[in-house]
Amino acid sequence: MNSVDSQRIVDDLSFCVIDLETTGGNHSKDKIIEIGMVKIQAREVVNKKSFLINPEIAIPEFIQNLTNISQKDVEECPTIDKVIHEIIEFISDDIIVAHNTSFDVPFLNSVLKRLKKPPLKNNVICTNVMTKHLIPEILNSNLTYMSRLFNIEHSMAHRAYDDALATAKLLIIYLNIFIDKGIKKVNQLYYPRNKFELDRLHFDHNFTNKDILEFFQSQKRSMLMTIKGERGLILAVLPLQVPEDELEIISSVLNSTNWNLITVRLMKPVLDGLFHFNNHFKKYPEEIRDMLMNYLSSRYHSDNKDKVALEKIDFLLTHHLVTDQVIAYSFLHLNTNTKQLFKIPAQKKKLYQYLNNQINRFESNQKGQKKQLIHHEIKPLIENFLTLNKGQNKYLYLDRKSVKESKEQVLKTIESFSKEDNNDFNFPSKSI
């Protein structure tokens, strides 16, 4: 399906973005104090409406502080029964969108029920749920954070109109992405699983080797290329640090495999790409395995006598693709199939607890023996890579002793390291 067809699918739809501010989360006793609504057609905002509403009950102090809506602000406002007809008329039969539909839609329906009116039967899309499909490894998807990641102006969080408008802008960004990635049917908006992730692209049999090489010619961000053959058999995994400079090896791998599907994924850090390479190493055809090892060994060759030794690493932290997230690897028990993600500073204490748990496991269950699931052929490759990247603020090394003895200092170090991320990928604002 071409981009024109994908655009037609999206632009034929009409959306109404809503957001509620309420006195609390209890449908039976709490009341709406503000509603914001934004109508979208053909990926443009075409109408807006908002109401402050007199709830006829006291607004809890913490809600007043959260929303900056005081009791006095709503005293002279209409009650919900006076404006509900206008609200329902504005929503019409549009697809209802909210950043947390599991709250907004049931709450509004509970109001309709109380007023003896039929519930909304519109189709519903949640941009919060959509975010988790499009950015699978994101740890925090609240509207304020998403506005920051996508450079959306959102000056008054927890005000219904401003939240609805920010959600509308986020939805429009997502709709453009669906078009760019070739949406084929409306249903994919509701269930965008495994098709529209912002950090990856899929090339099937409709693409040629030339098409793929042309894609890589302008790519500067590090990526992972996974090549699959019949029945999903992995033929090769190739970490690419600067793809536009590595066209020769990409071409060699493409020409040496009878591939059915190629997935290209943004990869930060490159170390994670080397771990993926390790995970499937024995599955590659021997010719491909030798080709990849020769290339990577040459690319990450180091004559530095002061090499990083994996046996001496306890913990390694590195910046994740998503801003404010870090990856923690425990080399006490390293499983390259899994990684631990933490959002800093919100989860720095959780990260510290993870480090402590790993130490306790190492000392009790493992009896002080490190377990690192890395093929012996790849170990020197990873050591050389880490040696070449020493002192570049990309990787933070922590040892068991400092973790156990200096909690506050370790926490400060972790937070400081997180702030050093230069966000060079500009993800997800700049996706793939």
Image (spheres, rainbow, N blue to C red):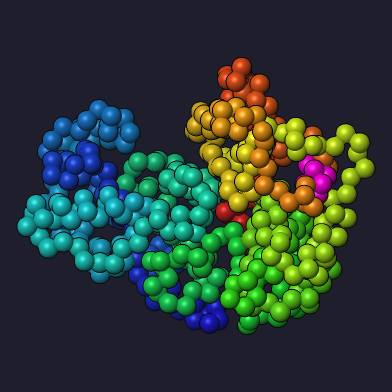
Q: Quadrant of residue 241?
A: bottom right
In the current view of this chain or complex, which residue is farthest to the top? 405
Q: Is residue 381 magenta?
A: yes
Q: Which quadrant would residue 155 be assigned to in this image?
A: top left
- Rendered position, 94 above or below 420: below
Q: Nearer the viewer, residue 152 or 235?
A: 235
Question: Does the stretch in magenta take in 257?
Answer: no
| Residue 16 left/right relative to 394 | left
Instruction: Identify the residue at horizontal 43%, vertical 58% (top origin).
Output: 130
Residue 395 lies left or right of residue 86; in this view the side is right
Q: Main secondary structure of the magenta part?
A: helix
The residue shown at (52%, 45%) is 148
In the rendering, at what x and y percent does residue 376 appear?
A: 77, 49
Q: Is residue 253 left or right of residue 74?
A: right
Q: Hey, which quadrant is residue 77 in on the image?
A: top left
Looking at the figure, which quarter contains the C terminus? bottom right
Residue 159 placed where, x, y %? 33, 42
Q: Residue furthest left?
A: 116
- Which residues are drawn in magenta? 380-386
The x, y position of residue 118, in whole percent, is: 12, 63
Q: Residue at x 82, y 64 (%)?
A: 290
**In this view, 108 is above or below 393:** below
Q: Is residue 66 visible?
A: yes
Q: Decide which of 65, 320 is in the foreground and name it.
A: 320
